[in-house]
Each structure stands twice: as structure tokens, then as C-alpha cells.
Image (cartoon, helix red, strand yellow):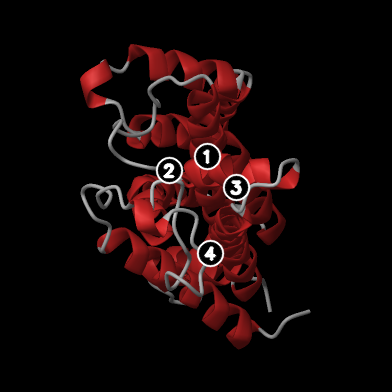
């Protein structure tokens, strides 16, 4: 298993790369340049150009700006709900457990993709974006995080664990925030948050790719903004036709790999000792 410090360094490095791409994303793509059509990374550093001579770097930057804030916020929501689920299990109240269980059963039984599509259709065309879809996905994913965190708290002893530590003179904040959340719930909370951020990224790519294939407006971003799905759309024909767009496909898959690596390494860094 990868060392914890190395995993943390890799995860944070991936996050910094994504933040850097998103923060410096241009509002619009460069103008058409017929002399730079389909140039490779060596001809147009660092990633080459598309069929209109525009740098693929701008595709990567705009795609990162689309997914960056919504995916991070969705991860934080799921992580926060996991913390709530674990702490509520330590309350030792049957009524609270019943309410949490009812919430989990109702929300968990909803079909995610159907709900996401309904939310997407309800968003006005002029204000479409990934954020509402990411928050809806986070709410639907919350019951799983709450249930897993509650199971961890239950194995600790729940309310009995809290009472034992309080009897030894520990403060409320030390018991709940340090012993329960930081030491015991951390692996679950971080993994669930990282996986949710990754899932939101995949959701955006899938919806944008389908919209591009149907020549429709995307649910996740404005028409003048490009997604990582557009890189895959440009690069896919190189697998079946003699089209020099393999560098676009490689860039798109590489960006997806960075998000996946970030999720896996951050989860590994937060694992229990």
C-alpha cells in the first residue's frame, strides 16, 4: 500500500493542477487559425490544437473551471453529512436514529439519474450549470455516507463511548471533533467526499458528451464554454479513422486520470492508522 505521506502529496498535487487549470481558464476560446489545424503537442506546446487551430490547453482550462467548484462543494456536502450521521449515532436517541433512517431510506431509494435529469430540465436554459446537478447528486449520495459513518460510530460504542471519555474529563469538542471525527470518522468522510467529487466530474463529462453527440446545448455549462467531453469527442475518431486527433483523446483521458488519482490518493492518505 502506498505510504500515507506520498499519497497525500500526490492527491494535493492533482488538486493543485486542477485548481490552476480552472482559475486561469479563458472566457472564450482563441480565434480560428487555419495554419495550426490539428497540430500536435510538439508543434503547439503543451497539448496541441483542435480542428480549428485552437489550443487544447484552453479546452482543459475551461473544462476544469466547469467541474472544479461544483465537484468540491458536492464532496464537502457529502463529507459533512457523513460527519452528521456519525455524530447523531453517538447521541443515543432512538427517535434521532429513526429520523435518520427514514431520511436514508427515502432519499436512498430515489433513482439518481432520473432525479438528475429532472433537475436539469427544471433549470432555466439561460442559467444552466453543473452546480445544481452536483448538489442534487450530493444529496442523493448522502445516505450512504451517513450510514457508513454511523456504523463506524456504532462500532466505537456510540453514546457509551462519549460518556466514557466525558467521565475522564475530556471536553465536548475533544470528544466529538477529535476522538470521533478526526480519529475515527476521517477515513470514511474523506473517502466519501473524494469519491463524490470524482462522480460529479464523470457526471459532467457524460452529460456533456451526450449533448455534443446530439448537437444540443449542455445542461452543465454555457454554449461558449468547452468541457473535457469535447476533448473526447475530438479525439475519439482517431481510434477508427485516419484523423490526427489522438493527442486530444490522450489529453481528455489524462485529465480524467488526474481526477481519479486525486480521489484514490486522498482516500488512501486519510485511511485509518
Residue 158 appears in the figure: no
Mark 2–mark 1 CB contact (< 8 Å): yes
Q: Which of marks 4 and 3 is in front?
A: 3
Q: Is mark 4 on a helix, strand or loop?
A: helix
- Provide residue 229's location: percent of width, then percent of height: 51, 41
Q: What element carries label 2?
A: loop
Q: Is mark 1 on a helix, strand or loop?
A: helix
Q: Nearer the viewer, mark 4 or mark 2?
A: 2
First in residue order: circle 1 vs circle 3: 1
Which residue lies under the disc numbered 2?
227
Pick the residue in front: 255 or 41. Answer: 41
First in residue order: circle 2 vs circle 1: 1
Q: Distance between the residues labelled 2 and 3?
A: 13 Å
* Residue 180 marker: 4
Which residue lies under the disc numbered 3?
235
Q: In this view, does 98 lie above or below 32?
A: above
Which residue lies under the disc numbered 1?
205
Q: Residues within 10 Å of mark 3 (few under 14, many from 20)?
A: many
Q: In this view, does 148 lie above or below 167?
A: above
First in residue order: circle 2 vs circle 3: 2
Amino acid at each position: 500500500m502506498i505510504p500515507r505521506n506520498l499519497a497525500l502529496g500526490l492527491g494535493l498535487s492533482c488538486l493543485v493542477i486542477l485548481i490552476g487549470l480552472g482559475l486561469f481558464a479563458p472566457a472564450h476560446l482563441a480565434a480560428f487559425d487555419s495554419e495550426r489545424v490539428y497540430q500536435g503537442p510538439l508543434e503547439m506546446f503543451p497539448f496541441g490544437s483542435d480542428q480549428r487551430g485552437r489550443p487544447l490547453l484552453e479546452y482543459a482550462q475551461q473544462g476544469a473551471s466547469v467541474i472544479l467548484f461544483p465537484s468540491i462543494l458536492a464532496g464537502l456536502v457529502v463529507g459533512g453529512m457523513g460527519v452528521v450521521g456519525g455524530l447523531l449515532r453517538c447521541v443515543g436517541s432512538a427517535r434521532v436514529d429513526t429520523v435518520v433512517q427514514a431520511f436514508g431510506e427515502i432519499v436512498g431509494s430515489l433513482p439518481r439519474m432520473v432525479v438528475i435529469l429532472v433537475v436539469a430540465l427544471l433549470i432555466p436554459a439561460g442559467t444552466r450549470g453543473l452546480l445544481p446537478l452536483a448538489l442534487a447528486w450530493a444529496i442523493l449520495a448522502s445516505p450512504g455516507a451517513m450510514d457508513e459513518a454511523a456504523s463506524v460510530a456504532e462500532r466505537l460504542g456510540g453514546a457509551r463511548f462519549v460518556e466514557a471519555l466525558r467521565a475522564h474529563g475530556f471536553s465536548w469538542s475533544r470528544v466529538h471533533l477529535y476522538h470521533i471525527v478526526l480519529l475515527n470518522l476521517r477515513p470514511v468522510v474523506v473517502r466519501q467526499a473524494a469519491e463524490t467529487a470524482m462522480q460529479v466530474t464523470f457526471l459532467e463529462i457524460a452529460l456533456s458528451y451526450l449533448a455534443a453527440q446530439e448537437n444540443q446545448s449542455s445542461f452543465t455549462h454555457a454554449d461558449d464554454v468547452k468541457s473535457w467531453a469535447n476533448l473526447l469527442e475530438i479525439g475519439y475518431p482517431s481510434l477508427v479513422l485516419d484523423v490526427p486527433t489522438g493527442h486530444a483523446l490522450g489529453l481528455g483521458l489524462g485529465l480524467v486520470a488526474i481526477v481519479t488519482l486525486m480521489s484514490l490518493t486522498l482516500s488512501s492518505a486519510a485511511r485509518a492508522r
